[in-house]
């Protein structure tokens, strides 16, 4: 029997009037699985509540909603799909938090081909993808995977045993077993990338967020019969905790003095989604 879960996400969105809130809300309510949208003009925030039934899920390229293999009702909505719906109104959106405290994580996926000698230099790497995770029950986590600017093909998504990026993907070790003797717990599935270099997947997996913090995530066209090698189409990142709902109220970076949106502009130039 399918189990329904609900989760919340919070986005920073430029809002200047009630009409802006209505425009964003109308766009979001077109997505199946969205149950509640609230806009806050004063704080420039939009909170979104969605629900869905868990199961093994995949999101077709440029799709808005993932489909559950064992559920007749709507599946949960991917955060990347919510961002796209907000951007369709002519506004940008930054994910500020999702789920409860300590229940969310993120991995920025970058290429390390010919750059392993400069891994400490942020400007030397190119962002090619993003993985957002939110734990929706004691033993289920939703993973929203997005790739941009890679070659067409089938990419395997895995969580690795180690989080060592000294040599990029080559130093991340085998697929994380997580105590499983047969299928490794870190095998997440595949992402199909089309001719325009874009691909997305939304999967439901049996692990808790705390188990994967500090591990590396890799998306690659390579198989596991040989050790991983760095190439232009293998992307890797370390999984780190991200803010839950209302955990992140920073609007100016204490390190650079830049506003939230100035930081966003800089990250987009690096390829951030």
Image (spheres, rainbow, N blue to C red):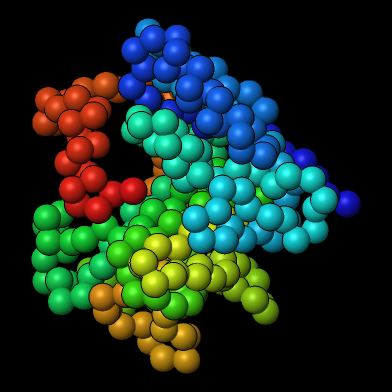
Residue 38 lies, with reference to residue 209, above or below; the image says above
Residue 189 rendering spot, x and y as whole percentages: 57, 69
Q: Is residue 215 left or right of residue 32?
A: left
Residue 249 rendering spot, x and y as whole percentages: 35, 20
- Residue beneath the point at 31% across and 83% down: 229
User: How many numbered marks have been drawn onto this rendered protein structure?
Assistant: 0
Residue 68 rendering spot, x and y as whole percentages: 72, 56
- Residue beneath the point at 82% across and 51% down: 72
Residue 118 lies, with reference to residue 104, above or below; the image says below
Q: Quadrant of residue 219?
A: bottom left
Q: Is residue 207 visible?
A: no
- Residue beneath the point at 47% across and 17% down: 21
Q: Is residue 14 left or right of residue 213?
A: left
- Decide which of 228, 30 is in the foreground and name it: 30
- Decide which of 209, 20 is in the foreground and name it: 20
Q: Is residue 120 visible?
A: yes
- Decide which of 204, 146 is in the foreground and name it: 146
Q: Is residue 238 left or right of residue 182?
A: left
Residue 34 rendering spot, x and y as whole percentages: 64, 32
Residue 34 lies, with reference to residue 174, above or below; the image says above
Residue 206 lies, with reference to residue 135, above or below; the image says below
**In the image, farthest residue toward the bottom:** 225
- Residue beneath the point at 54% across and 71% down: 190
**In the image, farthest residue toward the right:** 1
Q: Quadrant of residue 113?
A: bottom left
């Amino acid at each position: 029997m399918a189990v329904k879960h609900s989760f919340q996400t919070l986005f920073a969105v430029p809002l200047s009037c009630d009409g802006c809130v209505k425009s964003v809300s109308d766009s979001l309510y077109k997505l199946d699985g969205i149950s509640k949208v609230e806009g806050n003009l004063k704080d420039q925030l939009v909170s979104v509540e969605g629900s869905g039934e868990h199961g093994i899920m995949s999101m077709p390229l440029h799709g808005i909603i993932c489909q559950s293999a064992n559920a007749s009702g709507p599946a949960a909505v991917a955060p990347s799909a919510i961002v796209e719906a907000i951007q369709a109104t002519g506004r940008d959106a930054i994910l500020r938090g999702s789920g409860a405290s300590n229940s969310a994580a993120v991995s920025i996926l970058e290429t390390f081909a010919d750059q392993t000698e400069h891994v400490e230099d942020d400007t030397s790497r190119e962002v090619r993808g993003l993985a957002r995770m939110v734990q929706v029950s004691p033993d289920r986590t939703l993973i929203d995977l997005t790739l941009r600017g890679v070659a067409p093909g089938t990419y395997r998504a895995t969580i690795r045993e180690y989080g060592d990026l000294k040599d990029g993907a080559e130093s991340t070790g085998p697929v994380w077993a997580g105590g499983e003797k047969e299928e490794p717990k870190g095998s997440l599935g595949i992402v199909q990338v089309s001719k325009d270099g874009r691909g997305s997947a939304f999967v439901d997996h049996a692990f808790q967020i705390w188990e994967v913090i500090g591990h590396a995530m890799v998306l690659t066209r390579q198989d596991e019969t040989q050790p991983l090698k760095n190439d232009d189409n293998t992307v890797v990142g370390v999984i780190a905790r991200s803010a839950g709902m209302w955990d992140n109220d920073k609007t100016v970076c204490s390190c650079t003095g830049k506003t939230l949106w100035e930081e966003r502009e800089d990250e987009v130039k690096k390829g951030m989604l």
